[in-house]
Amino acid sequence: MINPLRGMKDLIFEDSQKFVHIVTTAIKIAKNYGYTYIETPILEETALFKRSVGESSDIVGKEMYQFIDKGANDVCMRPEGTAGIVRAFISNKLDRQDATHRFYYYGPMFRYERPQKGRLRSFHQFGCESFAEASVYEDFTIISMVSDIFDALGIRYNLEINSLGDNACMPDYKEKLIAFLESKKESLCSDCNRRIVTNPVRVLDCKNESCKTILKDAPKLIDNLCDSCRDDLDRLCQLLSEHKITYTINTNLVRGLDYYTKSAFEFVSTEVGAQSAIAGGGRYDKLVEFLGGKSTPAIGFALGIERIMDLVELPEQKREGLYLGTLDTTALPLLLQIAKEKRAVQKVYVEYEQKSLKSHLKSADKLGYLKACIIGENELKDKTVWVKDLQSKEEQHISLDVF
Ligand code: HAM
């Protein structure tokens, strides 16, 4: 027997229903916020992710599904959606238009991580990316959209925000931070030591308890922001409070991808175990230019569909549709004809097997149909159908001409 690969799973029955429920709920809300659908290839040049997500990140450093294809191209299964969408934004010359563009997407992402509950190697994200809007109002609006999605799905969350600064304040801060980290080098773990050189800000995110204690005294980005970043963060906090979206500032929130500037945020749940981040995002004002496009501010988020699956309750299924059955197989052609007509407006199930009336009704009930329409010898003769409403229990004979 061939099983799915480690860290990969099939979504069937209740899981697939939850998947569809999450995606349709999120799409409805994203459309109300003016987002349109974008679909980009799952496979991209490896260089795209190295440049955008960053060589020093775990995602690129350890977790890429990377291979050389038959044409000797170095390619990679996307570990996240943003890089491909920024590539598409530039490839389609949208950076040359003086206009905002807002896209939503969903689909599989691949990260070669150590699998555990809520952490898969093949998982799905729903995400949004907004281009060419630099205003902090857009930061607020995108956070508000994520909170609307979780509210609509009945999921409770804590929102954490931070500012990762920009070119005006980040370089000075990095110097200060490196000086602090160098002075504590001996006591920090090997991962932190490696990151002092590759990406010092990521050290702040270390999960090692003894590092965490040392890092409590590290200089905080939030105390070193330039006026523009500080003003934006203050305004964002004010807008969130005004709209009753509860948040906390987490000065150590740095995100696992290198492209962020200014606002960064994570939605976390206390109900999903160790992998508590259910959505994350932020501003990435430098990425379009960095990948060769015209300088364009941008912001986005992605939520992990499998990660919220256990938190989502499916809405109560209402009885619907028509079950067609026969007591006499000679009625089958007629059943197929009725099915064809009725399928134009509703869900129809056709049972090909000849069964007793009782057994048909049992099946129709089990499958959740609203009405059972059964044709036997008498109905064939009279050109009628026998219909039972499985909710009201009402039964009637209806002439075929008006059915
Ligand atoms: P991310 O934080 O790496 O951000 O992923 C977003 C969400 O995907 C996470 O909060 C989590 O719910 C889910 N996720 C991540 N890894 C896994 C995994 N191995 N198994 C299951 N779920 C997972 C991004 O990917 C950015 N592209 C978000 C973004 C969009 N930033 C700006 N625009």
Image (cartoon, rainbow, N blue to C red):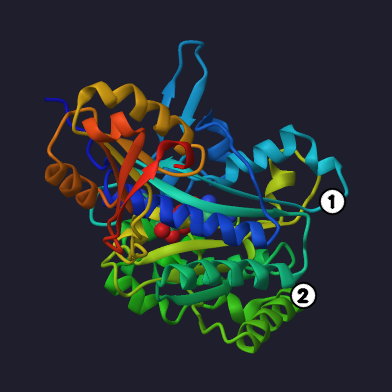
Q: Are marks 1 and 2 in contact (CB under 8 Å)?
A: no
Instruction: Tell which residue pokes out farthest to the top in this image.
Output: 71
Q: Is ligand 1 less than 8 Å from the beta carbon at label 2?
A: no
Specify the quadrant that holds the N terminus. Answer: top left
| Mark 2: amino acid | Ser
Who's the residue at 64% across and 56% down the image? 31
Q: Which residue is mark 1?
A: 99
- Does 298 sit above or below residue 290? below
Locate residue 376, reporting x and y percent.
Answer: 23, 34
| Distance from the alpha carbon under mark 1 to that under mark 2 | 23 Å
| N-term-proximal mark, 1 vs 2 | 1
| 128 or 163, nearer to the observer | 128
Image depth: mark 1 or mark 2 in front:
1
Locate residue 104, reporting x and y percent.
Answer: 60, 50
Q: Quadrant of residue 306?
A: bottom left
Q: Is residue 120 visible?
A: no
Locate residue 96, reporting x and y percent.
Answer: 85, 41
Specify the quadrant that holds the C terminus. Answer: top left
Q: Which residue is mark 2?
A: 228
Q: Secondary structure at mark 1?
A: loop
| 266 or 197, nearer to the observer | 266
Locate residue 297, reporting x and y percent.
Answer: 75, 56
Q: How many marks?
A: 2
| Mark 1: amino acid | Ala
Q: Secondary structure at mark 2?
A: helix
